[in-house]
Amino acid sequence: MSPGAHDPAPSAVELVVLLDDDGQPCGTAPKADVHTRTTPLHLAFSCWVVDRAGRVLLTRRAESKRTWPGIWTNAFCGHPGPGEPPEAALGRRARQELGTQVTGVRVVLPDFRYEATMADGTRENEVCPVFLAELADGRLDPDPDEVAEWRWTSVDDLVADVAADGTYSPWALLQLGQLLDAGCLARPGSGPVS
């Protein structure tokens, strides 16, 4: 992928998959209409990018984002479209948000589900499987409409920052705890974190 190359925004209205209380698809809605004070349960995904040294990629969401603008979070998130496999959606969003490709994609928290409410009342309400991946070529060229900043950090430094009241998205905080509990994030030379 050449520098500055991002998948173009979809020309049609982007749809998200609505879910019933059992997590089964029950319809669709335009993405632009979903995140409100009465956000319906819908399908999403979250991806943590880890390098060979065990560092994790963090991104600060662009100020123009509808939910949690300007907040640090995991590498990227998104919503599979109707009939789109989560892995395909993940590849699409890696290109759109980070201007890169990912490899070694694996689901690590397949049943993650959460709700969170912003100060203005806007809610997240998602069934959101969590994936780990690596960058295919190590390069990043984030779309500034998606990502304001990015940085690599060690698991130890991330945990210390969270403990010191570092500001992160609610889903990243919940996922971090579960990833640590499951031993999915490792410190270099020490094996899985428990």
Image (tube, rainbow, N blue to C red):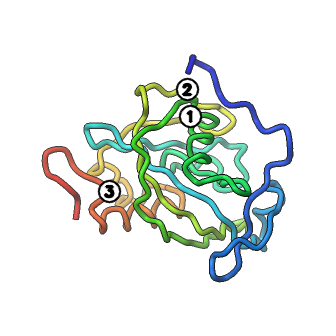
Q: Nearer the viewer, residue 193 or 131?
A: 131
x 67%, y 52%: residue: 84
> What's under tag 1, amino acid-wise?
Leu
Question: Quarter-wise, where is residue 169 in the image?
Answer: bottom right
x 19%, y 44%: residue: 188
Q: Nearer the viewer, residue 15 or 71?
A: 15
Which residue occupies the extreme top position in the image? 2
**Mark carried by residue 74:** none
Reading the chain from its start, which is encountered first: label 2 or label 3? 2
36 sits left or right of 52 in the view: right
Q: Secondary structure at mark 3?
A: helix
Image position of 163 with respect to 102: above or below: below
Residue denoted by label 3:
159
CB atoms of marks 2 and 1 within 8 Å: yes
- 3D distance between C-alphas at marks 2 and 1: 6 Å
Residue 52 on image: x %, y %: 28, 37
> What's under tag 3, amino acid-wise?
Val
Q: Residues within 10 Å of mark 3 (few under 14, many from 20)?
A: some
Residue 13 on image: x %, y %: 85, 48
Tell me the quadrant of the picture where the N terminus can be found. Answer: top right
- 3D distance between C-alphas at marks 2 and 3: 26 Å
> What's under tag 2, amino acid-wise?
Asp
Tell me the quadrant of the picture where the C terminus can be found. Answer: bottom left
Residue denoted by label 2:
141
Image position of 166 with respect to 178: above or below: above
x 32%, y 56%: residue: 159
| Number of disc labels | 3
